[in-house]
Image (cartoon, helix red, strand yellow):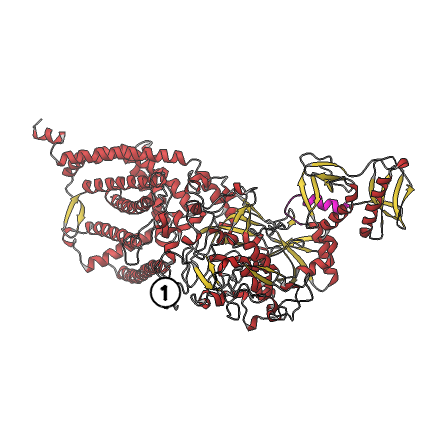
Amino acid sequence: MFFGITSVLLIIALNLRLTFGRFLKHLPEPEREISADNFKEYINWIVRWKLSFLRLKTWDRALDYLINWAKKEYPGWAAWVFYGLVLSYAYLALSGFIFAWFVPRGLFGFPLLLHVAAGALYAICLTIILFIKARVYLPDKVAEKASKESSGFYCPFLRKSWPRPYFQAAAFWVFVLAGFLLASSTLGSMLPYFNYPAQIFFFHLHRWSALASVLAACLAIDVMIVE
Amino acid sequence: MSKPDETKKERRKINWQSLRSALTLFFGITIFIFVTLQVSHLLEARSRGKKPQEVKVKAEEKSTWSRSEISPLHRIPLMDEFNQKIIPAAPDSPPLSTRYTCAPCHDYERISRGTHFNLKDRPASDRRTEPFVLVEEKSGFQLPISFQNYPGFWSPEKLGLTSWQLVNLFGRNLAGGGLGEPGEKDITPDSRWNVSGKLEINCFGCHNKSYLQDHSEWVKQVMRQNFRWAATAASGLGEVVGMASRLPETWSIIDGPNPDDHEWAVAPQVKYNQNLFDSKNNAVLNLGQPDNNNCLACHTVTARKAASKAEAEMDVHLAAGLRCVDCHRNDLSHEIVRGYEGQELLSSGLKVDEFTCAGCHLGQKPEKGGFGFTGKLGAPRPAHKGIPKVHFERLSCTACHSGLLPQKEPQEVYTARANRLGIFGKAHWTSDYPLIVEPVFVREKDNKIYPERMMWPAFWAEKKGQELIPLKAEEVLKAAPEVFNLKENVSARLSALLPLSSAEFYPALVVADFLFEPNADASLDAKRLEQSPLSGRSGYENFLLVQVRNDEVSSLIPSFDPEEAPAEVEDKIFQILQALKSFSDSREPVFVVGKYYYRVMEGYVEKIEKPGQEAAEPGIFWLSGENFEPLFSDYEIRTLVALGQGPEVLTEEQVQLVLKKLNSQQPERQVVYVASGLVFSLDKNGRLTTFEHPAARPVSWPLAHNVRPAQQALGKNGCTDCHSPSSKVFFGQVRAVSPLKSERGQEKLGADFMDTGHLFQFIFGFTFLGRPYFKLLLAGCVLVMGIIIAAVVLKLASRLAGIDSNSHDKTGEK
């Protein structure tokens, strides 16, 4: 119950915040403020945007965009690893959260089997991506990159833009750390070394790591992928 | 901007506004539904944890417990049913009455509402327990009867069984009281309560610690309808002779012994053991908390495959030195803690949750938070290492820990109440029927899976519309005695051949791979032969008459030259032919040897020349006209071969014959036979067909014992104990066992009773073959990720601490 409500609120809040920030950023600088008018416009904007996904064309465009982005960021075979990560992650997140929110029994049956299978793919892809990309998000590299980019992520409260590399690094490392915890908790619950309280701990660790991972993924989409 | 453009923009704005409202409404409703669902789940979870509001009157009377942990020696006067003190030395002393003997100190009325006595008014929420099974072996009846209202259980009211009949049928395992003490409205015309007396609560049955306490004696007295004498006899306080069942209906205890009959209709009398009384005529009784034997008299369950007591397993708790009553406790209310989660006690002050598996082994969380203590009675706290949490939500503790270990098929078991275990005497009391198997894993209403014992009802019934109404066994037996008495008829003919056998030998019959011997019940016992001359042959000519002594088998039919027949042989032939005449059925028994046959004519044996071919071997036949028919018919031999050694008592052919007879007797009704999970009936052409019906479905009840040691719990060897493509738990074959030998019986997989789906369990089980590799892969990923993350953390830490090499470079301090 607590997890259900918290996760829904956090995911909605983060996405509202990210899209609202993105909306404000497109306004002329003097108009970038939290106001009822802006909020109304934002609602109009976001609804229009969401509705555009009712058209197949938008999906096509989004997919093309993602593929191009992946090819640029992950040249060669690495792009396939990225696709594997995206696909497995999408299923993991959807199956996990939908069952957690709407099915009291939790994940079970064939969706659970697929969840486990997708989990394996996710763990492998994440490890490879980490291996390839870790150096890009090392602290000094991030600081260096941030020094070259003064704006990027707009904060409407402080009315200031922050360098995006910091947020990209944060999203990446939180996503990786959450993935690490997700894999560890899965592995832990399967090993014959941990007793019942540990199993309970692993279960909760898995859930909350998944939430952290989804939040990090949302942030990553905003600060890394979508221009 | 032109005007049409403005109008267009205006329209779009309006559209957007309405769309926005619609979307706001949509999101509002979605959030509302989500929150409502979550809150309802929370409330449901809370209500599950909390007991429902109940109106119950807890007894507030002063406790009778002195606070001493010892059980006092009971030096008490024994009272009879008229509340008069019994003088053991007096002639014609009456039997004791527990109602008046125990009542001065113990509240008999309150106790009589306890679990063992109050079968009729148990709480509706009470988990179902083993039913009584109405068994009539010869006609293939095994009908589960219970006052508990669960599908498949037949209520006594529906079957028209009165308290009197129930006590007579099942009194051997009743603890007295309840049904045994009927009220005025329960006294039916068929009853003989006045003669038998009431079956009062047998306090001694559980509490008497004397070595003289004898369950078998209780059974004997109940079978003799000596209800009011049963407790006295079973306790060993007195010896009871006589049988109330043989007394006329008009007899009353006040009439005393029958002076005219000392052999047959002898009124029950007690002869007290005066060594058990003091000089003041008070009985000196060793009473206390029940010992295991007291409980096991009615609650034993044993695997049929256990050939001797040495092979039988023991409950781990008893092996550890615990007694049944250590967990199954009760206070004065005698409402027994059954030990399952969620039991509701109506009048007991005990807290059920403390005595469940989890109560002792995990400890209960106190109501106001904090953690409870575990280890009651030294219960070890289980670690359950490596077992995912879902198992504790979806399985009962017993699923992994109790009952027989799952095999390819559930195993047949004997239970004390159903199969009459624990009754000792000259006769062999243990009955093969009903056929009960365990473990079958069944999903119950609480969505948890429990190991259960299961049986398939078998009965003859009249089909009225969609309803099946069981017939009485007597009616069915009467309709087709030759079908049901097949073994008895064969046995009788074999017994008639006794004069032919040598000293200490007795006649028997070899058919196919089996040796059939007459038994004490005038039926047949079958033994499988290691080597049989008739192996694989089942025709009517393929039987062999033999004589048997222990394991020694030889030919029964003497071989001799009929021209010079010894007088003693001819005398034996005369005797057997004479004996066989009673089964002749308008035919004549004859003994054929060579070209002659012997027959009995006017009290003499006569040798006559046989028409036709000379007999290759001597034998016994029926002469019908000019035909020589074999001693045992094709149908008899066929049926014996089909039934063999198995527990079944009927073949499809026999069922077909009986149905034809029953239907022809009353053509307006349709009679069917329910067995093996199906209903067998005759089609228009008189052939046997089957259909499914709810009344034919198996009935099951959760089992709790024997609890196996933790080392033998499912899962101890890993997940594949249950999760594999060849899992015995999910893919074990659950075949209907019933009195009917048929290939058409219901057959299901274990997964069917759990509602888990075959395909899913198969694939899920299959994944466990690759599970070790999956773990290795995951471990590899975790290791690599861990190393990289650790390296980054170290780098970040060193940077924060100012010892990073790059920062040194920048400052030039290197």
A164 versus B155 height, above or below: above
Q: Chain of mark 1?
A: B
Instruction: Residue at 69% x, 44% y: name it.
Output: B642
Disc 1 residue type (three-letter): Ser
Q: A156 and A40: which one is in front?
A: A156
Determine crowd level at label 1: few under 14, some 14-19, many 20+ residues with C-alpha closer than 10 A.
few
Instruction: Judge from the rendering whether residue B482 lies leftward or rightward of residue B146; answer left or right.
Output: right
Quarter of image, res B528: top right
Can residue B161 be seen?
no
Instruction: Residue at 18% x, 41% y: name it.
Output: A166
Quadrant of the drawing holding the C terminus of chain B = top left
Q: Give the residues drawn in magenta, as a range.
A: B633-650
Residue B483 appears at what percent x and percent y?
Answer: 73, 53
Magenta-span inclusion, residue B198: no
Q: B417 and B229: which one is in front?
A: B229
Residue B604 appears at what percent x and percent y?
Answer: 89, 47
A138 versus B401 height, above or below: above
Q: Which residue is mark 1?
A: B63
The furthest residue to the top: B814
Q: A163 and B782: which one is in front?
A: B782
Residue B730 appears at what percent x and percent y?
Answer: 49, 44
Can residue B109 be seen?
yes
Instruction: Judge from the rendering whether residue B112 lies leftward or rightward of residue B16; answer left or right.
Output: right
